[in-house]
Image: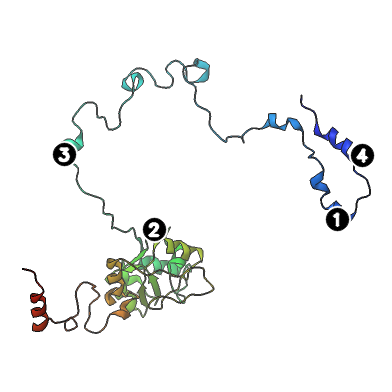
Amino acid sequence: MPPRIPSLRRTFRFIVSPTVDSKSSLFLPFLLPQARNASILADLRDNTKAYSHKIKRGRGPSSGRGKTSGRGQKGQKAHGKVPSGFQGGQTPVEVVAGKRGFDNQFSVNMSKVNLDTIQSWIDQGRLDPSRPITLKELVKSRCIHGIKDGVKLLGRNSTELKTPIKVLVSRASASAIAAVEANGGSVTTRYYSPLAIKRVLKGDSPSEAFEPGPLPLDPQYKFRLPDPTSRKDIEYYRDPAHRGYLSHLVGEGETPSLFFRTPGKGKIATKKSVAAKAENRIW
């Protein structure tokens, strides 16, 4: 058994003088030895359930994994291993029929909310029509349960909507936009990235962002809302038919498309420029 440290501490007390000034008293706790047993190293162990022990198989019936070791009675799985995808020896179905379809990597998973559900939530007092209905309000009122890539407003039973509302969502259908505006409301679609949605729900980014274009930095929030970077998203939110927040960038006679140029604004090649290019040719 190793010696105990508290006994050494008692002897150390006689060595240290009882009269200690105020400056040296600050370093006294560091000069005294630790009041911990030297045998603590023999008692170190992990926390309970810190790791799981390996299951011992074939060690008798009392262990619960004896005899057949949990494999059961006979059969292919009891005698050996079965490779994944093995179908009993027949020709695999994917070889006979072939693989069909594909996973669209550009698809988005939008949470759907319909106009009849919003009107029902207003009638129950769970949504305030005098305030803008945003992503945060929809999640807080449990009108939708979780958001992945955004929220799309749909026009199911649009005739039931009787209250003028102001909605800010990621996307909206044409029937939903027409029904909301027919009741004196407005719809605005804005781009939200998955990270921006988490920040909006947490309160780190503004939720009522109806202003067109990039928002100025607000000291009340930690992060600004991002703008779309892909051409598909930019064209969607530039379209006035979708009530996009970037529709003010589309001038008169222009289209939301970034591919086609507006007629009359492109450069017209002259004969001199064509002749100059012809002279620079090698053959």
Residue 37 x %, y %? 77, 33
Q: Which mark is residue 181?
A: none
User: In the rendered structure, which disc, 4 or 2, sits on the residue that comes first in sequence?
Assistant: 4
SS type, badge 3: loop
Residue at image location 28% in from the left, 54% down from the top:
105
Name which quarter of the figure residue 116 lies in.
Answer: bottom left
Tell me how far mark 4 sits from mark 1, CA to CA: 20 Å
Q: Which residue is mark 4?
A: 14
Q: Nearer the viewer, mark 3 or mark 4?
A: 4
How busy is the neighbourhood of tag 3: few (under 14 within 10 Å), some, or many (20 plus)? few
Say the numbered circle drawn on residue 148. Answer: 2
Specify the amino acid type for callout 2.
Lys
Q: Are marks 4 and 2 in contact (CB under 8 Å)?
A: no
* Res. 6 visible in picture: yes
Other residues around mark 2 within 10 Å, as few (<14) / some (14–19) / many (≥20): some
The answer for how far apart the CA atoms under marks 3 and 4 are is: 91 Å
Q: Which residue is mark 3?
A: 97
Mark whose residue sits in front, 4 or 2 = 4
- Residue under label 1, please give it: 23
**Residue 73 percent across, percent down from the top left:** 37, 18
For the residues marked 4 and 2, what is the alpha-carbon distance in whole angstroms? 70 Å
Marked residue nearer the N-terminal end (3 or 2): 3
- Lower position in the chain sequence, tag 1 or tag 2: 1
Which residue is found at the position 37% from the left and 63% from the top? 150
**Disc 3 marks which amino acid?**
Ala
